[in-house]
Image (cartoon, rainbow, N blue to C red):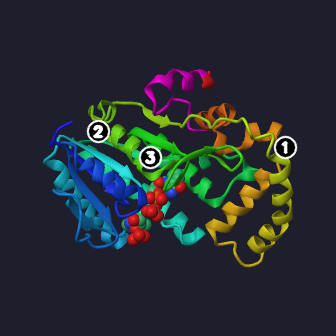
Amino acid sequence: MTRNTLVIVFGAGGRLGTRLLLLLAKEPVTVLAVARKDKPNVRPPGMHWMQIDVTNPAEWPRSLGALTGIAGVHRHTVLVDLLLKRATVTTMRTSIAAVTSYILQLHERLAAVGQSSSLVSASTTATLAPWLYQTPYGLAKRQQLARYATSGISGTAFLLPSLAETGNDRPENLGLSWSYSEAARKLAAAITGPTTSVHGRNPFRLVVPDPPTRQSAVDSYTQRAKSAARRLLPAHMSLLFGRWDSPQQHREASHHRLAVTPPSLREYVDHHRVPPFLLRRLKRSLGGLIEVTNPAPSTARAANERLS
Ligand SMILES: NC(=O)c1ccc[n+]([C@@H]2O[C@H](COP(=O)([O-])OP(=O)(O)OC[C@H]3O[C@@H](n4cnc5c(N)ncnc54)[C@H](OP(=O)(O)O)[C@@H]3O)[C@@H](O)[C@H]2O)c1
């Protein structure tokens, strides 16, 4: 990886994006941050910034032309997708669909002028959820994953667990969560590592987290189920009568459905626990020609064994 590599980060001003920019600033790559907001006064040294609203197609010809020109003086371009507008279900779907189309168009433009590019995308374990536990967010990210995986672009999609300021592994809650910094470190390693820098000839990879430990899951079930059962109906009534456009309300209702699911079944249906059965199903639905790996190299073999 050299200064001849250009890394374009979409959604650079977000929680994950700002942490990732700090890490990339230490690497020998050229970084171009793409955000809807103007550049912040304080930003990592040497960082380039471009203001683009990807949901506004009127802006596309100008910005796609500019990005193709900038990429033209580099040997390889890594396109990093961290973009999301989660205010409502509508804006969330629109932002995910728009950034996917934008990145694939940019990839095609670069290919047309003989430039190689690859993708690193922040996806989510929510793409694994079966329909009863699914949310509009999980579905939109799953459709995005399918578009990327079948487009011919090479690269890596991270099925990230829930992100928080500090990560944990607490099965009595929702299972695994990573800190933003931890997720940013893993993305940075994929962006600057050899697999995304070799002329776009690599397979499309899904990186999955290790499932959380399960020790107290069964013990705490009765208490959790009782509390969730009380809130299950009000949460769904609120969803049906007024808050249908709220991603947060869909998430909450789905969490209550999971919490009342018996532990023996939850093993198979809870995406927070990354069940091998759901991974196999996702891999098949994406065409099967996808490599599944784990961010910790020592457990990469275990990830493939879980899938075979
Ligand atoms: N947070 C989690 O728990 C979690 C878990 C798994 C996966 N992920 C994935 O990780 C990625 C980043 O998550 P995050 O929590 O860092 O999100 P975030 O803090 O909401 O950041 C998203 C960024 O996208 C930008 N954006 C939204 N609409 C845009 C548009 N039309 N044009 C240009 N930029 C736009 C936002 O800018 P504005 O501020 O201007 O809107 C914001 O800076 C997402 O793809 C998400 O699906 C997150």
**Mark 3 closeness class: few <14, some 14–19, many ≥20 residues within 10 Å:** many
Q: Is residue 200 above or below residue 112?
A: above
Residue 249 higher or lower than 113, as above or below = below
Position in image of residue 149 (x %, y %):
48, 41
Q: How far apart are the alpha carbons under marks 3 and 1?
A: 30 Å
Cα gap from disc 1 to disc 2, whole angstroms? 42 Å
- Mark 3 and mark 1 lie on one chain; the one further toward the N terminus is 3
Q: Ligand 1 is located in which of the four quadrants?
A: bottom left
Count of picture labels: 3
Nearest the eye: 222 or 306: 222
Residue 38 in which image quadrant: bottom left
Amino acid found under the numbered disc labelled 2? Thr
Is residue 90 placed above or below 5 in the rendered structure? below
- Residue that badge 1 annotates: 262
**One can see residue 41 in this view:** yes
Q: CA distance from mark 2 to mark 3?
A: 14 Å
Q: Is mark 3 within 8 Å of ligand 1?
A: yes
Task: Give the magenta range.
Answer: 285-305
Query: Type of residue at label 3?
Result: Ala
* Pointer 1 or 2: first along the chain: 2
**246 displayed left or right of 289:** right
Location of mark 2 (residue): 192
Amino acid type, mark 1: Pro
Q: Nearer the viewer, residue 27 or 200?
A: 27
Q: Residue at horizontal 16%, vertical 45%?
A: 74
Quadrant of the drawing holding the C terminus: top right
Q: Which residue is mark 3?
A: 183
